[in-house]
């Protein structure tokens, strides 16, 4: 068994980074895109730690601490933004958001519309019989 | 005895202060106009005193020791270096033989423009007057700068108030006109900046005096001097303008309010010619002879002919006067490239003479426009019958611009042509130059006389009563007419002022000739001019 | 007789133009302040002062054999080269200024009556006085610059006077035509000045300097050709003659002054100075050849003008136009006289031959001024009586109602035709003699001079014919008055008839006094650069031939008039052509005027609609380039990410591969 050396760690981090990159470019779901970004960040963090380990100083690890903090803040911001965006278009599809394009370019649309998940069937509604029991009002919690 | 050189700094300062004052008087229209007129009259009076004093002294200065400083210096402040061990930039403002009468011309034109009536400004008289005064002040500063970089800065700065004036108060197509003027002139100016920095880098200084004394050695920059020369002249070629860079002129002159057209034609065009003279003739005379004479001379001859032909086909009066200006300034350029004493002195004289005559023409046209409402040639008929005095003065100024001797333009035109043909630089262009110049002289009379016949003579239409000229209009046009006759019959004062500087040019050409055999032809001409 | 010092003559010389100039300024001021009716007095006094001074100067200078130069300051100077206000006063200048001011005086007096009711009197008399001043400057000029000042000055005054009634479109068009055609000549004159200045290397173009400096024969030739073109323009010779007939649109006294007596003679005066001057006393054959070649051209143009103008005059119905063409014809005579040049082998030196030729031209100039002004003023009197109608078909038989005018016109017509012993006979005879002697000399050009002689003789016949055709049509036959005359149809007031009588007396006597007695010859001996040889008056063959031609012409006119009473179209097509001015105007219109106007408009179209959009095309290039790059910005985040990734790969590749 070969002892893990710097190139191995760098390979792993490279794989993580590229997976993240490909995921960001290829996926349409906003949350999945965000997860891919986090994956890229983790790949970079691993890279730093590996160099810290094999150079013998702790600069890399210090930087990873910064990186994790920033990733956490970034997560909060990103998810808040995604929530606001979802509320506006009620979809997590990134291709709906092309408004920053040049004015005379057309919106890029799919050749065939995506098969959307069927709308959830409405819950069965019984006809009202008798008097509805009194229910305490519950506040709406999200 | 009051040292008039001390008054010199007031000449650009008074209009500048007036501009600030007028901007403050944003709402008070009448007060702003009154302030502007008063301050310009004061500045004009001071300018007359200074110019008179300087030009009276110049014969003595010419006879005095050559090489002595012969200018009235206003201020001389060293501002610093562009780079470490780079050329020094100094704010030196002075008048000497070349720019004295140009400063005077700016003051005269500025006063007449401000005094000719503010009807065109509408409600915003304060800002308009402020911008005009600012333009006047910046132009005077440009003429008075004795440092190339400072000259360039003021040269480009004059664009800003004029751009605003045309764009805000002009005719229907004003936005296009001001935009085109600004972009064309700026593009040329950037080329000039490039050339300027190269020259300063090679010679190590921005100041005229040291450039004058500079001996070209082997340490010149590696770039081809002809290219540097053309780059340097580019901005001035566009500013004057010369064919084929004249496309901004017709529309800008037409769409600008008439007093601004006066300023453009009489003063701003001379900035370009002045730059050609200072930078081309004094800094790079060798290249002026080898490159400038064929290229600039050819463009000048083309301007003379094209300008005259287009003036005939012009559809309204201001466009006609724009093309007429294009045509006449071609003669000045011929004088500048001649490197001949008669040519150069004639060019400087013609700059002032043309400025005065074109002021008269455009102001008279402006007064007619106020009453007629339009200057389209197809609608102007019988003007002499309708406005006898104003039209009569327009005809007088037209005859002056045709070149009748006894009126100012003849002396300048003749000396420019004489210098051009005598100096031998014309051999480059040969028959084309002679044919172009001669036909230009005829075509100039042709379109002028056609204009007078079609638009000025003839019946004025049923039931119209002759309109007398207002006293203010008469005063302005009358004083310009007096200036025209004075300059025509007694040109000595204006002509002689530039003699010391032209003598310096001769010294410089001789020193260059000792180093470089190219200049022998021009000097041979100068030698022939010496009395036996 | 007059013993005035040189300084005195210099001062008096300055006064000759200065007094009419002062008169002009006073008239202008009087006109501005609504005292226009006093303008004739101011103008008259100015011109009278000019005349007295000119007379004094002429009489003082007649004995001097050196011209007197007066310098009144510097006009402008370049370095040590100065152009001064120089006058050169010699016998010729004295004689011409005296003639000009004398005729101008009577024309001013006539105008006082003719322009009596015109509202712009101040402007009119100011311009006439200014004209007289400019003409005096032209004649007295001592260098080419002052000459050019006077030359253009009379041109501008002529333009303003022909277009005096500016509300009339024909007058405005005629004024423009006059100015532009003479401008062609003026440009040539300017070219001559530049040429001479470049080759002499100086701006000091005083006549002495130009005549005495050694110049290449080529330079002499070209500068004289350019001066000739200038003279041709000003004196309205073929092919620049088209402006003179149109210029009759101006007031008739203006036609009399400018287009008969003074301005058009400036060209003849210039050449009369320059041809002998450039010939000089050196017997340098190439230079003499150069001058003689230009004289030949001058003679050819003069002959063409004289003949063609006479033909055109035959077909005219407008009385003033007949007189205009006759002016052209007589000026052609003067040019023909100037053509005679001498050969080195002749018994007289070339300078003597040229001087005699110039003398003949000047003699004819002087007498022509008197009788032509007389004829024009008489026609003005006729116009005044006929309510400004001048078409000869509309009136006739006026001898009965306009007796004084009739008598004066008849004297003028006889003088023009060259009937002895009136003045025209002596001066025309002088020219015929000069041409005849040239034709019989040893010169290599003698055949050419003979041809000119016969053309001159035939033109004399035509001159007599058309002059008396006009006379018979106007004054003889049945009395017929046009409607426009109203109650004007009577003799003109004294202010108009007195000048007529004075000029008629001059036409009668001047020739007798000056010619056969040899007094003019003696007087002009003192002219600078001339050398006149002795000549005596005797009956000679040319004289007889000339008289016969004149009498034949008068006889033919009388014959046709008494036979047909209308003198209408005996020669059919030729007269139609003559009436249409031999279509020369139409040719010019088609070949020069219209194409030039089209060229101007085409250039305007080219600049506005072709060239400017071309430049604007340059401005669209940044926009096009920008447009290419804009499609990258499509708003898709993942596309941007992909672009970033690709860019990163490229940079990494550059760093690794380039290593």
Image (spheres, rainbow, N blue to C red):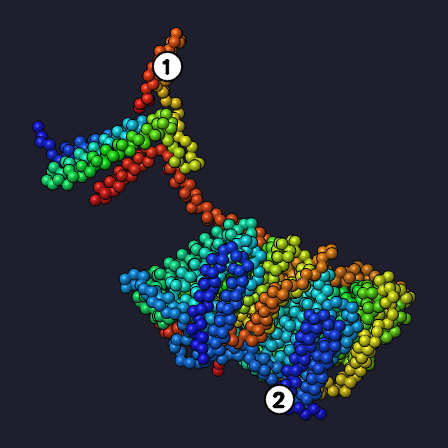
Residue beneath the point at 36% across and 20% down:
A115
> Visible in this render: residue B342?
no
Dot 2 falls on a residue whose secondary structure is helix
Q: Is residue C620 left or right of residue B321?
A: left
What's the distance in space between the residues labelled 1 and 2, CA to CA? 129 Å
Q: Mark 1 points at which residue?
A: A122
Residue beneath the point at 66% across and 82% down:
C15
Q: Where is residue C596 drawn, in percent x and y? A: 62, 57
**Disc 2: which chain?**
C
Q: In this view, does B96 lie to the left or right of B214?
A: right
Dot 1 falls on a residue whose secondary structure is loop
Residue found at the far top of this picture: A130
> Visible in this render: residue C577?
yes
- Nearest the viewer among C635 and C409 is C635
Q: Where is residue A24 drawn, in percent x and y? A: 28, 31
Residue beneath the point at 46% across and 48% down:
C619
How many dots with numbers? 2
Q: In the rendered image of this protein, does residue B336 appear above or below residue B157?
A: below
Q: Where is residue C284 drawn, in percent x and y? A: 57, 81
Residue B377 quadrant: bottom right
Q: Are marks 1 and 2 in contact (CB under 8 Å)?
A: no
Residue C393 quadrant: bottom right
Q: Where is residue A72 drawn, in percent x and y? A: 23, 33
């Amino acid at each position: 068994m070969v002892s893990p050396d710097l190139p191995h760690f760098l390979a792993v981090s490279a794989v993580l980074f590229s997976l993240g990159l490909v995921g960001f470019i290829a996926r349409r779901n906003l949350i999945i895109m965000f997860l891919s970004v986090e994956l890229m960040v983790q790949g970079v963090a691993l890279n730093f730690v590996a160099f810290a380990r094999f150079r013998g100083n702790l600069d890399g690890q210090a930087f990873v601490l910064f990186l994790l903090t920033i990733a956490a803040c970034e997560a909060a911001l990103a998810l808040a933004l995604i929530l606001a965006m979802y509320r506006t278009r009620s979809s997590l599809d990134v291709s709906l958001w092309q408004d920053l394009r040049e004015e005379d370019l057309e919106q890029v649309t799919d050749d065939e519309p995506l098969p959307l998940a069927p709308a959830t069937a409405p819950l069965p509604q019984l006809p009202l019989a008798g008097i509805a029991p009194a229910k305490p009002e519950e506040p709406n919690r999200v | 005895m009051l040292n008039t050189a001390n008054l010199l700094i007031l000449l650009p300062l008074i209009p500048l202060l007036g501009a600030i004052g007028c901007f403050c008087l944003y709402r008070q229209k009448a007060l702003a106009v009154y302030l502007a007129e008063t301050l310009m009259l004061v500045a004009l009076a001071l300018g007359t005193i200074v110019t008179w004093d300087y030009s009276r002294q110049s014969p003595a200065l010419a006879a005095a020791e050559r090489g002595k400083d012969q200018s009235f210096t206003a201020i001389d402040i060293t501002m610093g270096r562009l780079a470490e061990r780079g050329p020094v930039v100094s704010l030196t403002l002075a008048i000497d033989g070349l720019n004295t009468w140009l400063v005077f011309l700016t003051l005269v034109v500025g006063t007449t423009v401000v005094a000719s009536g503010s009807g065109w400004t509408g409600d915003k008289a304060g800002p308009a007057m402020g911008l005009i005064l600012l333009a006047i002040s910046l132009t005077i500063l440009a003429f008075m700068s004795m440092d190339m970089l400072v000259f360039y800065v003021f040269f480009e700065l004059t664009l800003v108030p004029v751009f605003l004036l045309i764009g805000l108060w002009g005719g229907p197509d004003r936005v296009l006109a001001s935009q085109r003027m600004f972009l064309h002139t700026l593009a040329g100016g950037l080329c000039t900046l490039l050339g300027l920095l190269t020259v300063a880098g090679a010679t190590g200084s921005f100041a005229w005096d040291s450039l004058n004394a500079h001996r070209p050695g082997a340490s010149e920059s590696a770039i081809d001097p002809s290219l540097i020369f053309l780059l340097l002249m580019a901005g001035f070629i566009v500013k004057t303008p010369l064919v084929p860079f004249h496309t901004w002129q017709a529309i800008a002159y037409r769409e600008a309010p008439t007093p601004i057209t006066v300023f453009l034609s009489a003063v701003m065009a001379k900035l370009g010619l002045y730059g050609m003279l200072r930078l081309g003739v004094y800094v790079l005379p060798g290249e002026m002879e080898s490159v400038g004479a064929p290229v600039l001379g050819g463009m000048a001859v083309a301007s003379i002919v094209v300008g005259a032909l287009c003036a005939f086909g012009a559809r309204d009066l201001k466009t006609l006067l724009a093309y007429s200006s294009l045509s006449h300034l071609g003669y000045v350029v011929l004088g500048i490239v001649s490197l001949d004493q008669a040519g150069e002195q004639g060019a400087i004289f013609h700059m002032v003479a043309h400025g005065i005559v074109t002021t008269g023409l455009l102001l008279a046209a402006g007064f007619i426009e106020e009453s007629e409402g339009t200057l389209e040639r197809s609608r102007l008929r019988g003007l002499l019958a309708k406005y006898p005095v104003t039209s009569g003065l327009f005809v007088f100024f037209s005859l002056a611009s045709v070149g009748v001797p006894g009126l100012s333009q003849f002396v300048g035109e003749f000396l420019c042509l004489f210098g051009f043909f005598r100096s031998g630089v014309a051999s480059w262009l040969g028959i084309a130059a002679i044919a172009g110049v001669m036909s230009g002289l005829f075509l100039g009379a042709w379109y002028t006389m056609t204009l007078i016949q079609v638009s000025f003579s003839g019946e004025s239409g049923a039931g119209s009563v002759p309109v007398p000229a207002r006293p203010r209009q008469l005063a302005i046009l009358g004083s310009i007419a007096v200036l025209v006759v004075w300059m025509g019959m007694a040109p000595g004062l204006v002509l002689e002022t530039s003699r010391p500087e032209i003598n310096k040019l001769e010294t410089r050409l001789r020193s260059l000739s000792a180093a470089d055999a190219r200049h022998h032809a021009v000097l041979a001409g100068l030698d022939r001019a010496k009395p036996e | 007789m007059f013993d005035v010092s040189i300084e005195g003559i210099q001062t008096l010389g300055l006064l000759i133009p200065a007094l009419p100039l002062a008169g002009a300024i006073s008239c202008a001021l009087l006109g501005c302040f609504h005292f226009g009716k006093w303008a004739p007095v101011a103008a008259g006094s100015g011109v009278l002062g000019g005349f007295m001074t000119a007379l004094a100067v002429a009489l003082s200078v007649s004995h001097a054999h050196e011209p007197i130069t007066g310098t009144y300051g510097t006009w402008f100077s370049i370095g040590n080269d100065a152009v001064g206000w120089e006058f050169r006063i010699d016998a010729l200048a004295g004689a011409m200024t005296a003639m000009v001011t004398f005729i101008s005086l009577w024309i001013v007096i006539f105008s006082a009556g003719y322009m009596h009711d015109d509202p712009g009197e101040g402007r009119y008399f100011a311009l006439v006085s200014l004209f007289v001043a400019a003409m005096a400057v032209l004649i007295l000029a001592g260098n080419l610059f002052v000459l050019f000042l006077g030359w253009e000055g009379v041109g501008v005054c002529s333009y303003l006077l022909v277009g005096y009634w500016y509300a009339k479109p024909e007058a405005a068009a005629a004024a423009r035509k006059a100015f532009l055609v003479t401008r062609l000549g003026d440009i040539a004159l300017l070219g001559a000045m530049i040429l001479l200045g470049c080759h002499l290397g100086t701006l000091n173009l005083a006549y002495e300097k130009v005549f005495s400096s050694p110049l290449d024969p080529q330079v002499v030739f070209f500068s004289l050709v350019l001066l000739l073109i200038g003279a041709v323009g000003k004196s309205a010779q073929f092919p620049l003659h088209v402006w003179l007939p149109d210029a009759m649109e101006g007031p008739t006294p203006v036609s009399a002054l400018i287009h008969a007596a003074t301005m058009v003679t400036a060209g003849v005066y210039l050449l009369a100075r320059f041809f002998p001057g450039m010939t000089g006393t050196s017997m340098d054959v190439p230079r003499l050849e150069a001058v003689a070649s230009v004289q030949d051209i001058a003679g050819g143009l003069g002959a063409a003008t004289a003949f063609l103008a006479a033909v055109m005059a035959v077909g005219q119905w407008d009385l003033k136009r007949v007189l205009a063409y006759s002016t052209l014809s007589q000026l052609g005579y003067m040019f023909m006289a100037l053509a005679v040049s001498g050969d080195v082998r002749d018994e007289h030196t070339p300078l003597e031959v040229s001087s005699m030729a110039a003398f003949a031209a000047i003699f004819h100039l002087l007498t022509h001024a008197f009788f032509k002004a007389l004829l024009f003023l008489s026609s003005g009197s006729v116009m005044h009586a006929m309510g400004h109608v001048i078409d000869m078909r509309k009136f006739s038989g006026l001898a009965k109602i306009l007796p004084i005018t009739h008598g004066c016109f008849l004297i003028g017509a006889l003088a023009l035709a060259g009937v002895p012993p009136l003045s025209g006979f002596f001066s025309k005879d002088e020219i015929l003699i000069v041409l005849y002697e040239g034709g019989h000399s040893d010169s290599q050009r003698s055949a050419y001079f003979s041809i000119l002689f016969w053309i001159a003789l035939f033109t004399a016949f035509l001159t007599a014919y058309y002059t008396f055709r006009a006379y018979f049509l106007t004054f003889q036959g049945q009395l017929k008055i046009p409607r426009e005359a109203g109650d004007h149809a009577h003799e003109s007031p004294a202010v108009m008839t007195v000048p007529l009588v004075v000029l008629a007396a001059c036409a009668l006597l001047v020739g007798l006094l000056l010619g056969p007695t040899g007094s003019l010859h003696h007087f002009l001996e003192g002219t600078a650069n001339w050398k006149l040889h002795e000549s005596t008056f005797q009956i000679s063959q040319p004289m007889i031939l000339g008289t016969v031609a004149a009498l034949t012409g008068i006889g033919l006119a009388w014959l046709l008039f008494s036979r047909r009473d209308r003198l209408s179209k005996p020669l059919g097509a030729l007269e139609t052509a003559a009436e249409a001015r031999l279509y020369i105007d139409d040719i010019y219109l088609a070949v020069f005027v219209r194409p030039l106007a089209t060229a101007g408009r085409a250039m305007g179209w080219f600049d506005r609609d072709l060239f400017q959009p071309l430049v604007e095309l340059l401005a669209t290039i940044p926009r096009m380039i920008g447009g290419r790059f804009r499609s990258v910005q499509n708003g898709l985040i993942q596309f941007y990410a992909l672009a970033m990734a690709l860019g990163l790969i490229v940079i990494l590749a550059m760093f690794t591969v380039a290593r």
